[in-house]
Image (cartoon, rainbow, N blue to C red):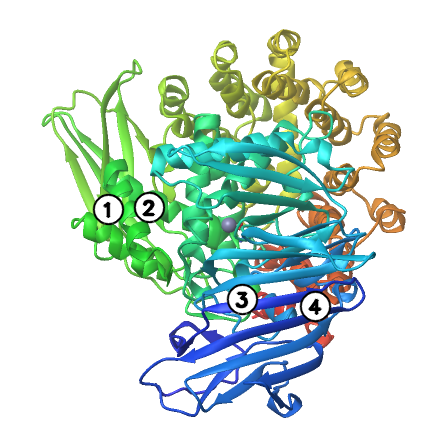
């Protein structure tokens, strides 16, 4: 295949070339030390039959490797001439089978990027996805090269625990000071799933019994400060294992399953084979320190990483363009698992998250296809598009094919591709083989970027008793503005009469740009509920009357559709500029009124129904960010609702004092409203003082901060004093401060000078810079100075950790929507960052797309 090197620093999916060799076994030996660790590696390269010799292969390396030595078939070879600028090595092999021996050093303590081998609070650990292995040693660092690993770890006894993937086959003493452990992973795997950990760790353990009776030993390792907060994660792991056996017939393939918690981690967690690594933020959970939301999150992430064992590890991705293959399937499986924990709730939260994060991403300069054709930087496709839109696409398969058809397709995929590195086309092929009626154009979901828009119009013909529904779909490329191909879009809908009875319930899959559905024997104009269960990741333009929405709010049984009716109604009313304030409050109040009784039947769901649309959701609809007036308006409406229903809110608040997730959810919605009333200013103060759990403490703090309670500052200080030893709670402290709508540049200066300010720990950097970056109200109010502060901090983070910095850039991605002159100012700030020349490839890739 002709290969033309390109000059634009982009990589192209179609440049993919399959490996020309195999490496059945890799033997790695680590002499671990935080300052300088020595790595010895040994492997045989077998060049495929049919490939002409001599043949060149590429071993990926990086600047992080030093003191390199190389032997081929026992002969010393000089390394330097074979290395390129990035540190990759090209080997030209004359024999079909040759033995490569490599030695190199690395410095975990110097690795602030946290990719490869690094140090986290005294624990030596690794993180290799997607391309961190090249920071450990020279090897083909690509997901389609699968190798069996045998790993020897040697370290001082002050690192008593030595872990790697697979099974511990030997351990022992070297001398008085040093010891070793040997691990073998029976499953061939790509480099990105490799992991090691060495440290002074403690563990908790349990057992899971597989359907065939064989046990899996489960352990969670953490520092002695953290080990007490891991029980919930361990219980969740067992639950996830059981669920995957039941739903998909997939059992754990390992006898030992280890999980390790570390404080410094770029992402949430990592699915390394048999040795998951977790950010403490995704694993620690005690009632005193974690909110109910955190608990759900821990359960979900534990399940997610475990589910990767089949969707990701046993079957992996051919290349990183196909990252969504493993992530989308795994997120979908995680969502299905969690929907059993809290039926209905998780779906709403997922849709809300998707619309809050993925939709803006997909409609702005960082938009990319779920499987892109070109990329500036691989690390930059770890996005909500790859994960959450990807998961919606998997859900589309299920919605179109039905649960049974989907499960058959999935089972076939697992069977056919087990042990292989494949693509989203392979998944489609399995689904199609089992379900021949699956639409041929389904894969367009993977290749076209942007959010499809559905335009709906209805007509009723009383004489013919006929209802017509006209549906048009549009998908514009968000960057080029070109109209793209129509997609298969399943629309779940139901008709209700005005008494709230459901008349019909169906799913229809649109496939063309314009389609018209005709319904016969319809006696009166029905109330139509469209896109029930959010059956496709699209926006729907269907103006419905307030009366119709009220019927749906009251009678819909579909969780999402009922919630969506509230969202729509409130949004409609808030954006109605001719209605006087009092009337806006009255209409919304009338619509919510019936839900107060419902709150006693379904408190957790009612908590969602009674919460007005997220600020950001509303801001995204504004033409040019008139954020502050809208924020003010929403607040006044909330105050109005607090007054009108003050009896009901108080009743709910007192009634729901019990210790349960649902009770806390509805109680804290009541707190939110009541705290808007000057007479109730003490409520949050008292709740803060008396609470025995972080959910209630957190809700109290938010109420105090958003209402500028005179005691807010003292209480925040008290919070910090109380929890300053607990890193995750210090993160929470910063996130609360950074997220408050009243944030000023003085506050920002206070945060910058705070003794716990730190950009080296990714959680802390995100808690500080991320929360301020997401604070649209403060950004709108303060303008350029705050953007400048954020830019400066991102550049500082970039010097430490480029992956983390690039993910903090999102506030700049909304640039085009800013009003002038702010837009120009912010553009100039972005341009300055880009021009500073010292920024990383990851960050400049993001900035270039934003500033284009
Ligand atoms: N693969 C991880 C997950 O989603 C995320 C991750 C990405 C971890 C990159 C480490 C590095 O489960
Ligand atoms: Zn994942």
- In the rendering, which numbered label is found on residue 510? 1
Is residue 492 or residue 615 the one in the foreground?
492
Separation of marks 4 and 1 at Cα, in angstroms: 44 Å
- In the rendering, which numbered label is found on residue 792? none
Separation of marks 1 and 2 at Cα, in angstroms: 10 Å
At x 48%, y 11%, the residue is 601
Mark nearest the camera among 3 and 1 is: 3
* Location of mark 3 (residue): 378
Point out the image quarter for the N terminus: bottom left
Q: Earlier in the sequence, mark 2 or mark 3?
A: 3
Establish if 712 lies above or below 535: above
- Asked whether the residues under the numbered discs 1 and 2 touch, taking CB atoms below 8 Å apart as contact, a structural biologist would say yes
Give the structural element (helix, strand or loop) at label 3. helix
Mark nearest the camera among 2 and 3 is: 3
Q: Is residue 713 visible?
A: yes
- In the rendering, which numbered label is found on residue 454? 2
Separation of marks 3 and 1 at Cα, in angstroms: 34 Å
Separation of marks 4 and 3 at Cα, in angstroms: 27 Å
Q: Earlier in the sequence, mark 3 or mark 1?
A: 3
Mark nearest the camera among 4 and 3 is: 3
Q: Earlier in the sequence, mark 4 or mark 1?
A: 1
Give the structural element (helix, strand or loop) at label 1. strand
- Asked whether the residues under the numbered discs 2 and 3 touch, taking CB atoms below 8 Å apart as contact, a structural biologist would say no
> Percent position (x, y) of residue 278?
63, 46
Q: Earlier in the sequence, mark 1 or mark 2?
A: 2
Crowd around label 1: few <14 · some 14–19 · many ≥20 (10 Å): some
- In the rendering, which numbered label is found on residue 828? 4
Separation of marks 2 and 3 at Cα, in angstroms: 32 Å
Separation of marks 4 and 2 at Cα, in angstroms: 36 Å
């Amino acid at each position: 295949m002709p290969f033309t090197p390109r000059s634009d620093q982009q990589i192209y999916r179609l440049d993919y070339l399959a490996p020309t060799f195999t490496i059945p076994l890799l033997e790695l030996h680590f002499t671990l030390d935080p300052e300088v660790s020595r790595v010895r590696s040994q492997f045989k390269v077998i060049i495929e039959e049919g490939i002409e010799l001599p043949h060149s292969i590429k071993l990926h390396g990086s600047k992080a490797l030093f003191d390199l030595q190389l032997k081929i078939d026992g002969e010393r070879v000089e390394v330097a001439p074979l290395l390129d600028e990035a540190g990759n090595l090209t080997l030209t092999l004359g024999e079909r089978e040759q033995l490569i021996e490599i030695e190199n050093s690395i410095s975990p303590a110097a690795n602030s990027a946290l990719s490869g081998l690094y140090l986290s609070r005294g624990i030596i650990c690794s993180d290799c996805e997607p391309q961190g292995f090249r920071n450990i040693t020279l090897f083909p660092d690509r997901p389609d090269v699968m190798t069996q690993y045998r790993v020897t770890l040697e370290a001082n006894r002050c690192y008593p625990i030595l872990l790697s993937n697979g099974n511990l086959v030997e351990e022992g003493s070297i001398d008085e000071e040093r010891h070793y452990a040997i691990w073998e992973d029976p499953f061939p795997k790509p480099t990105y799933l490799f992991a090691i950990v060495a440290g002074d760790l403690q563990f908790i353990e349990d057992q899971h019994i597989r359907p065939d009776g064989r046990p899996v030993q489960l352990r969670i390792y953490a520092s002695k400060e953290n080990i007490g907060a891991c029980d919930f994660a361990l219980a969740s792991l067992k639950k996830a294992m059981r669920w995957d056996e039941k739903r998909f017939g997939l059992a754990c393939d390992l006898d030992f399953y280890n999980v390790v918690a570390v404080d410094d981690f770029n992402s949430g967690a990592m699915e390394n084979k048999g040795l998951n690594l977790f950010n403490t933020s995704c694993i620690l959970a005690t009632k005193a320190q974690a909110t109910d939301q955190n608990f759900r999150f821990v359960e979900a992430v534990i399940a997610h990483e475990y589910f990767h064992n089949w969707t990701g590890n046993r079957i992996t991705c051919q290349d990183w363009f196909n990252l969504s293959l493993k992530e989308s399937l795994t997120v979908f499986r995680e969502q299905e698992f969690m929907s059993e924990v809290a039926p209905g709730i998780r779906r709403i939260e997922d849709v809300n998250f998707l619309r809050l994060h993925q939709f803006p991403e997909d409609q702005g300069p960082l938009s990319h296809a779920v499987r892109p054709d070109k990329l500036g930087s691989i690390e930059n496709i770890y996005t909500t598009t790859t994960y959450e839109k990807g998961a919606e696409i998997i859900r589309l398969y299920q919605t179109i094919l039905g649960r049974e058809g989907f499960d058959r397709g999935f089972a076939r995929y697992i069977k056919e591709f087990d042990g292989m590195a494949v693509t989203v086309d392979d998944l489609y092929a399995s689904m199609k083989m089992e379900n021949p009626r699956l639409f041929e154009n389904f894969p367009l979901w993977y290749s076209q970027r942007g959010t499809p828009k559905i335009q709906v119009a209805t007509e009723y013909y009383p004489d013919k008793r006929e209802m017509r529904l006209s549906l048009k779909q549009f998908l514009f490329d968000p960057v080029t503005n070109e109209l793209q191909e129509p997609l298969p879009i399943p629309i779940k809908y139901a008709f209700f009469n005005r008494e709230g009875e459901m008349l019909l319930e169906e799913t229809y899959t649109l496939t063309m740009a314009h389609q018209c559905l005709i319904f016969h024997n319809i006696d009166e104009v029905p109330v139509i509920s469209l896109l029930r269960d959010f059956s496709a990741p699209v926006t729907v333009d269907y103006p419905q009357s307030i009366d119709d929405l009220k019927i749906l709010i009251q009678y819909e049984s579909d969780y999402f559709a009922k919630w969506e009716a509230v969202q729509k109604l409130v949004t409609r009313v808030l954006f109605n500029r001719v209605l006087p304030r009092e009337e806006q409050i009255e209409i919304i109040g009338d619509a919510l009124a019936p839900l107060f009784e419902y709150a006693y039947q379904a408190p957790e769901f009612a908590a969602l129904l009674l919460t007005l649309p997220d600020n950001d959701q509303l801001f995204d609809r504004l033409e040019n960010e008139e954020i502050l007036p809208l924020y003010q308006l929403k607040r006044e409406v909330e105050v109005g609702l607090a007054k009108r229903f003050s009896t009901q809110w108080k009743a709910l608040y007192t009634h729901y004092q019990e210790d349960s997730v649902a009770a806390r959810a509805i109680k804290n919605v009541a707190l939110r409203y009541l705290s808007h009333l000057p007479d109730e200013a003490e409520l949050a103060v008292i709740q803060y003082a008396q609470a025995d759990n972080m959910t209630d403490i957190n809700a109290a703090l938010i109420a105090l901060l958003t209402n500028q309670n005179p005691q807010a500052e003292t209480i925040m200080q008290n919070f910090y004093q109380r929890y300053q030893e607990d890193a995750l709670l210090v993160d929470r402290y910063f996130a609360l401060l950074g997220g408050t709508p009243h944030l000023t540049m003085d506050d920002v200066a206070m945060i910058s000078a705070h003794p716990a300010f730190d950009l080296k720990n990714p959680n802390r950097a995100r808690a500080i810079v991320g929360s301020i970056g997401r604070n649209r109200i403060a950004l709108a109010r303060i303008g350029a100075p705050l953007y400048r502060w954020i830019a400066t901090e991102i550049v500082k983070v970039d010097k430490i950790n480029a992956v983390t910095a690039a993910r903090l850039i999102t506030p700049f991605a909304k640039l085009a929507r800013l009003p002038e002159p702010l837009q120009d100012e912010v553009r100039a700030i972005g341009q300055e960052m880009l021009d500073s020349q010292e920024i990383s490839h990851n960050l400049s890739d993001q900035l270039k797309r934003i500033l284009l």
